[in-house]
């Protein structure tokens, strides 16, 4: 049944797809994804996604963001005479009616298609050598987008990385206690509240005009960076959340995911800790790019970014747990709680390494 409707969807797009060759992919918590073969032998496959409109309310604005960003990246890479643009810049495939996405009336669903990027792989955890390459890749990504101004892109999820807003949502969840789970997690509420003031510093600096917003990816999980056959970074994917934010977002989310010795939802909390070596390798490469467009204050705040994004994720997972698991896909009933505990452990380990992170950054800046 699913395949029949999927075929109808695929036919709305311009690519000549092989309707008998559709493979569902298990990636991410938000959208549903499929690889669809190309009817022409040897030609690139297609990547079809159902966009989760409960999360992304303004699909049109979202697709315009992605179109602008992917075109900008293609243009910059072409200026630098880079080869292999087909794999280095994501390419949207429009519908036959010339739109960036397809709206399916029957079940009120939204769909988009890209070319699939062949011959790549990603990592859920990496070594210092790959972290160095990743730092360069993400620094370059932000640099390529640094001449897009804050108001050219919409916030595809309003207040997405706004810590004050996330805390407000969290406090509402605590107050409502919808799933009746508050009693067992009171200790975690305290862990969150005692750090709230520190973590809202970037929002205050923004209001004072001291900290800018720039175009960020806003989901720089380590596995959103694709590597090629030679283990060189080739493309950054999952652009739904590309939007204006503090530069702390992208630096921080990479640290949260790549510099964790355990998994985001590790069942054994003892596995989780902050890996300073990954931080050092990534930061060394990242600063070489970033010093060209970041202010001194932004650079100084990067270690706070690592803590902030981990803390924000802790808040978001726990909020969802309190609300009865309505946002993130879960695999077992206490999944969001386990995720929260693992994020707290990582945050505590980052706190232990905070001075070491700050010292490393000042040393590097003196060398550059
Ligand atoms: C979600 O779906 P995925 O894995 O790309 C979330 C991110 C979180 C992440 C936590 C739109 O990303 O913000 O950091 O889960 N994306 C959205 O793993 O909420
Ligand atoms: Mg994502």
Image (cartoon, helix red, strand yellow):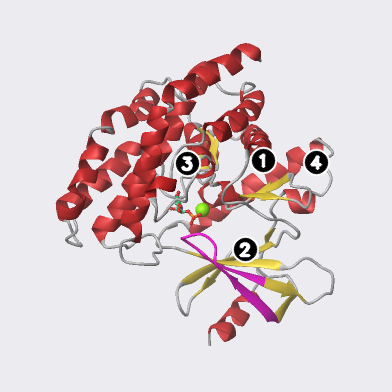
Q: Nearer the viewer, residue 149 or 136?
A: 136
Q: Which residues are magenta?
A: 20-35
- Percent from the top left, x then y, of residue 19? 69, 81
Cβ of mark 1 under 8 Å from ligand 1: the answer is no
CB under 8 Å between callouts 3 and 2? Answer: no
Residue 313 point in image, percent of width and height: 38, 45
Image-based side of 5 in relation to 133, left or right: left
Secondary element type, mark 3: helix
| Label annotation for residue 130 | 1
Q: Which mark is residue 256?
A: 3
User: Is the C-beta separation of discs 1 and 2 under 8 Å?
Assistant: no
Q: Is 313 placed above or below 2 here?
A: above
Say which label, 3 or 4, has the lower sequence index. 4
At 75% across and 53% down in the image, what residue appears? 87
Q: CA distance from mark 1 to mark 4?
A: 25 Å
In the picture of the structure, the residue carrying the numbered disc 4 is: 78
Q: Foreground: 175 or 210?
A: 175
Q: Earlier in the sequence, mark 2 or mark 4?
A: 4
Instruction: Report the Cα–Cα distance between label 3 and label 2.
Output: 36 Å
Mark 2 Cα within 10 Å, few/some/many (few <14, many 20+)? Answer: some
- CB atoms at circles 1 and 4 under 8 Å apart? no
Q: Is mark 3 within 8 Å of ligand 1?
A: yes
Question: What SS does tag 1 mark?
Answer: helix
**In the figure, 124 relative to 192: above or below?**
below
Asked whether residue 237 is drawn in magenta, I would say no
């Amino acid at each position: 049944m699913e395949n029949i409707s999927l075929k109808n969807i695929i036919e709305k797009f311009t690519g000549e797809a092989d309707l008998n060759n559709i493979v569902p992919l298990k990636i991410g918590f938000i959208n549903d994804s499929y690889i669809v073969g190309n009817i022409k032998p040897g030609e690139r496959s297609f990547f079809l996604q159902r966009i989760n409109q409960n999360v992304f309310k303004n699909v049109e604005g979202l697709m315009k963001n992605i179109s602008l960003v992917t075109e900008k990246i293609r243009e910059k890479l072409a200026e630098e005479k880079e080869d292999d643009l087909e794999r280095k810049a994501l390419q949207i495939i429009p519908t036959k009616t010339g739109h960036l996405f397809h709206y399916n009336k029957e079940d009120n669903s939204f769909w988009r298609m890209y070319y699939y990027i062949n011959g790549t792989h990603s990592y859920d955890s990496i070594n210092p050598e790959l972290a160095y390459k990743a730092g360069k890749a993400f620094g370059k990504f932000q640099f390529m987008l640094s001449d897009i101004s804050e108001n050219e892109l919409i916030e595809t999820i309003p207040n997405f990385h706004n810590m004050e807003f996330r805390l407000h949502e969290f406090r509402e969840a605590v107050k409502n206690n919808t799933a009746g789970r508050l009693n067992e997690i009171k200790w975690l509420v305290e862990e969150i509240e005692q750090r709230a003031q520190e973590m809202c510093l970037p929002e205050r600096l923004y209001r004072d005009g001291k900290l800018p917003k720039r175009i960020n990816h806003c989901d720089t999980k380590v596995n959103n960076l694709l590597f090629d056959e030679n283990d060189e970074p080739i493309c950054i994917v999952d652009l739904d959340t590309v939007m204006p934010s503090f530069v702390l977002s992208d630096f921080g989310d990479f640290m949260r995911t790549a510099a964790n010795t355990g998994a985001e939802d590790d069942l054994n909390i003892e596995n989780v800790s902050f890996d300073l070596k990954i931080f050092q390798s990534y930061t060394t490469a990242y600063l070489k790019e970033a010093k060209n467009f970041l202010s001194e204050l932004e650079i100084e705040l990067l270690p706070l970014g690592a803590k902030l994004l981990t803390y924000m994720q802790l808040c978001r997972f726990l909020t969802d747990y309190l609300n009865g698991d309505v946002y993130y896909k879960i695999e077992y009933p206490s999944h969001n709680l386990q995720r929260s505990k693992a994020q707290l452990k990582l945050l505590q380990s980052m706190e232990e390494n905070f001075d070491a992170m700050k010292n490393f950054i000042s040393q590097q800046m003196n060398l550059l």
